[in-house]
Structure formats: structure tokens, C-alpha cells
Image: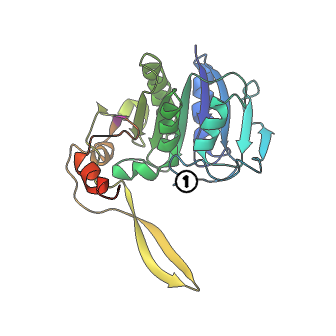
Amino acid sequence: MARVLVTNDDGVHAPGILALATALAEAGHHVTVVAPLDDRSGSGAALGPGHASGLRVERLSLDGLHEVPVFGLDGPPGMCVMAAHLGAFGERPEIIASGINLGGNTGRSILFSGTVGAALAAANFGLRGIAVSQSLGDPWQIGTGAAFGVGAVAWALERPTGSVLNVNVPNLDLADVRGVRSGRLAPFGVVRTVFEGEIDGRLVLTLRETDDELDTDTDTMLVNAGYVSVNALVGPRAVDEAGAVDALAGLVS
């Protein structure tokens, strides 16, 4: 069994992190929970400020996880991963499990997701990472997302370090899931940001569900159709761009 750091971007007290950490502990993994003290959704892989002044950390407890160390950190999930990588919470983890996010993380907007960002940060530090998100509903069938989270960790542990898997789960009972597919990233996810205007010097931005037609083989539509969508991801990487070299070389005398 592996040393697993569980984090998220919804905050350490969000229901998804409890479900994922519980399932991984029951599977026999050595689990440590380190997550933001508050909601840091949309933070991507950011580290945030605090390097100079220090970061507030609180030792906490979560229902039913009496043997699992739980920490709340005053920073985004990317910083939680970095601090764990540096040994702030004991022995360096072997894998980062991020989630279960309250709502899907599909499409190219995963660039902004703190849930996915934590998994990408793991790869950046030479770890493996998985991100699990689940569509919302009433009731929220969180046991389904937890089951696929355990399965994703098992898959990633057999992969090279630096591997990242993004998992999106429909809000269905496990028996009702239609299957698992790997779809193309949609142009956007299940919601889009809309600019409403300016009020008293503040920009008003809201999230609205998308009603645009998407291709059926995209990750967003696969989840809407009752499938679990999985995508292996890679972080930033350089590519050759001779044109840029030539264009800027002229500035050097």
C-alpha cells in the first residue's frame, strides 16, 4: 500500500475529501489529508503568497478518520502538495489524490481547476497525481466517485512518476454507470463564466450552466451521458519555436 496525500480545492471540511480519504484508508493506504482551510476553487496549480511570512496550519480531525492525520493549510491545494513534497507533514507521499470535487472538471477549463492543479503540481514535483470530480445532484452519490478514486490511485501507482489522471464521474449509483471512456477535452466544461457588469467598483462574474451543443465524444458530454470520463494529462512542456528565436535575436547587438 502507498503513502497517499489527499487534498482538494473546496476546503478541508468539504464532503468530497472525507469520502475520498475514507475510501483510500479503507483500501489499506497510508493516508494523510492536507487541504485548504477555506474554499480555493479556481486556483489552478497556484502556490499563493506566504513563503516569507509563513503559512498558518491547523491540526484537525474529520468524522470517522481517527487514525488519519488531517491538516488545514492557509494556502491553495498546489501549496499543500508542495509542502507535503518538502516533508512538512511527514514522509514524502508517493501519490496525490485530489478531490472529490463538488461538480465536474471537464473541458479546457481544467486549466483553472484547483482540483486538477493539485494533481499537475504533483507531477511537477516528481510524484503521481489523480484528480476526481463528480457531477452534483440530490442526493450526491459520493460513494461512486470514491470508488473510482480508489481505482484511479491503483492505476497511477503502476505508472511512472509524473503520471496524472483526471477522472470525472456522473452523479449515479455505481451500478448505473454506463462505462468508462476517454474523451476529447471539450472547449469548455459544464458551466461557463459570464460577466454581469460592474457594481460599486466590483466586477460581477457568475457561473451558468452551458446549453451549447458539444460533440458526443468530448469529456463533458460523456459524463452527461452517464459515463466516467478519464484523461491522462501532462503539465507545461517546452516545444521548439525557431520563429520566436529568430524574431527576438535581432534585439541582441
Q: Is residue 232 magenta?
A: yes
**Which quadrant does the C terminus fall into?**
bottom left
**Closer-to-camera residue (250/31):** 250
Q: Main secondary structure of the magenta part?
A: strand
Q: Position of residue 189 (x, y in %)?
A: 36, 53
Q: Position of residue 127 (x, y in %)?
A: 52, 26
- Residue sitting farthest toward the top: 1
- Residue sitting farthest toward the front: 253
Q: Is residue 135 magenta?
A: no
Please name the residue that numbered disc 1 is placed on: 41
Q: Position of residue 79 (x, y in %)?
A: 62, 42
**Which quadrant does the N terminus fall into?**
top right
The residue under the point 38% across, 35% down is 234
Magenta residues span 229-233
Which type of secondary structure does the marked residue at label 1 adopt?
loop
Q: Is residue 184 visible?
A: yes
- Quarter of the rendering containing residue 89: top right
